[in-house]
Each structure stands twice: as C-alpha cells, then as structure tokens.
Image (cartoon, rainbow, N blue to C red):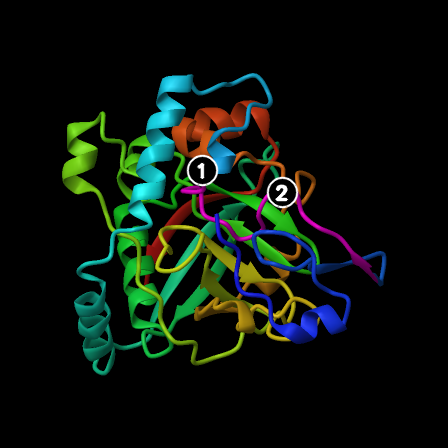
Amino acid sequence: MRGATIVPFLVLLNAAKCSAFGFAPVFKTAGSPVAALASRSLLRSSSSPDILSEQNEDMVISETSRRGILRRSVSLLTIGSCLPSFIANAEESSATEQTFTVVFTIQLDSSKPEELSELEIECHPDWAPGAAARFRELVELGFYKDSPFFRVLPGFIAQFGISADPSFNKQWMYCDTSDAEAVKLCKQPLPDEPRKVPNKKGTLSFASSGKNSRRTQVFINLVDNSGLPNFLDGQGFVPFARIVRGEDIVKKLNDEYKGNVNQGKAAYYGKEYFEKVFPRLSVIRDAKIL
C-alpha cells in the first residue's frame, strides 16, 4: 500500500519515518510531545491488503476469504473510469447545496448504556462536495449506527467508519464478489478533491489508502494537524466538516486500544468482532441529519 509522498523538509526536521503516512506523528502525553508510530497505518482505510492478512486475537478469517478480499481490495483501487464526471457533478451541485448538520449520539462508556452524549457536526459541501455528499449518504443509510471509534490517538486523531453491520462493509468497503447483492450494490471510492480548508482542531476528513481511495472511514482532528508535527494538509487529507457542539465529548472517547483494532477483521465480522475483542470502545449509537 502506498503511503503519501514525503515532503523534503520532513527529513530535515528529523520527523520522517516509514508508515502509511510516510512520517511518524507526534502525540502529546502527560503534557509533553512524544514521537511515536502507531501500529499499522494511522488513517488507512480497511481496503488495505496487509491488514487483512494479519491474524491476531481469536477470530480468524479463512485463508480463502482473505485471499478473495485481498484481490478485490487491490482491484478496487484501480477503478476510476467515471471518477472525473463524478467529481465534476459534485462540484457543480455544491454551488447550490447548503451546509447541513449531523448529530451523533455517542455512548462513551460501554458499561453505562444509559449515559449518552451528543456530538453536532456541521458539514460543508463547499469545502469538499464529494466528501460531504458521501457522508450524508452514509448517515442516511444508517452505516454509522453502532459504529465505534476504533482508533483514538490522543494528541492526534479519533477515527470511525467501519460499520457494525458486515453487509454494509461488503458493499461499501471491499465489495465481496461472493455475494451477488453486494456486487450489485458495490460503491466506488471517492475521487480525490482539492483541499480548501486546513486540518485544524475539530475538523473532519475522510481517511484513505492511496489515490482516489476514500470510502467510509472518517477521522476527527483532535489538534491542529495542518502543519507541524503531523503535516496532514501536505498529505492530501481534505476536511469537509467541523464540530460545532460536543468538543468536550471527543476528549472523553475511550483511547485504551490506540491503533490495535484489525480493520480487516472488523470489516468482515462487524459488531461481533468489536464486542468480543474490543468491548470498551466508545460507540456511535445513532447518527441523523437535522
């Protein structure tokens, strides 16, 4: 899987290391910056072949299934014949489409299902029309219902976007060719878009695994990641929304698992995998457009 291009001055700053991003982000712990490299990729989507080939915990995808998903995942990254027209149509429609609001109902503590909090997100089609349209579609579909924040890295990002329903993941994340309905409904990845606003604290951007590969996974910038030390603006990540209410809730998301969730298994098994192997993740119980 290709990482993003490393800009020369990262090397001069001694901030570059080998990862899916092409550098080692700096996380703030106990009030001081500590250079650290998260396990596996940081903002990689689950169409990545290598995460599907890992075997950990006690739930294992069969070799046949994994090889099939790997072949499909790689082939999907080459799909793009209709991407130019897609982005052109999205940009044209963004001129008239208004900002819209999405509200997440979040369960921060798995042991306290009665305690729910709200996160209000303001989406801007004028920032990134394709991303805003895809996010709206996924929210309306119910894709994010019961979806956990599976990667929370303090001082960096909080990431979500693997559905609790495996059938959604088949259609939207890796298009299982053994499922005729999934093939029929298979969704293409989003084409890349130009960045219009920086990856400031509280903004949301889609994760990616390479060129034209944005699908369902989204991350919240927990700090200003536009420049030093993480340089997300230079890595091609495009904000499409921002948090307008509930920023204090984001600070309380469970971060004990860091980047240890296997995205391939999570996509394949959905809720069963999350609840059995990572039972204390903070979860989006509901998502709706106001």
Q: Could you tell me how many numbered marks the image carries?
A: 2
- Residue 180, visible in the rendered structure: yes
Residue name at image x 51 percent, y 18 percent: 59
Q: Secondary structure at mark 2?
A: loop
Residue that badge 1 annotates: 49
Q: Along the line of sight, which residue is nearer the eye, 234 or 128?
A: 234
Q: Position of residue 280 (x, y in %)?
A: 61, 34
Residue 173, placed above or below residue 31: above
Residue name at image x 24 percent, y 70 percent: 87
User: Would you say 240 lies left or right of 158 here?
Assistant: left
Residue 1, placed above or below residue 70: below
Q: Position of residue 58 (x, y in %)?
A: 57, 16
Residue that badge 2 annotates: 259
- Residue 165, visible in the rendered structure: no
Q: Amino acid at mark 2?
A: Gly
Q: Which residues are magenta?
A: 33-48
Residue 206 in which image quadrant:
bottom left
Q: Neighbour class for label 2 at 10 Å: few (<14), some, many (≥20)? A: many
Q: CA distance from mark 1 to mark 2?
A: 17 Å
Q: Amino acid at mark 1?
A: Pro
Q: Position of residue 237 (x, y in %)?
A: 48, 66
Q: Position of residue 224 (x, y in %)?
A: 64, 72
User: Would you say 221 lies left or right of 211 here?
Assistant: right
Residue name at image x 45 percent, y 52 percent: 209
User: Would you say 281 lies left or right of 46 here?
Assistant: right
Tell me which numbered mark, 1 or 2, is placed earlier along the sequence. Answer: 1
Which mark is nearer the camera, 1 or 2? 1
Q: Secondary structure at mark 1?
A: helix
User: Is residue 42 magenta-colored?
Assistant: yes
Q: What secondary structure prevails in the magenta region?
A: loop
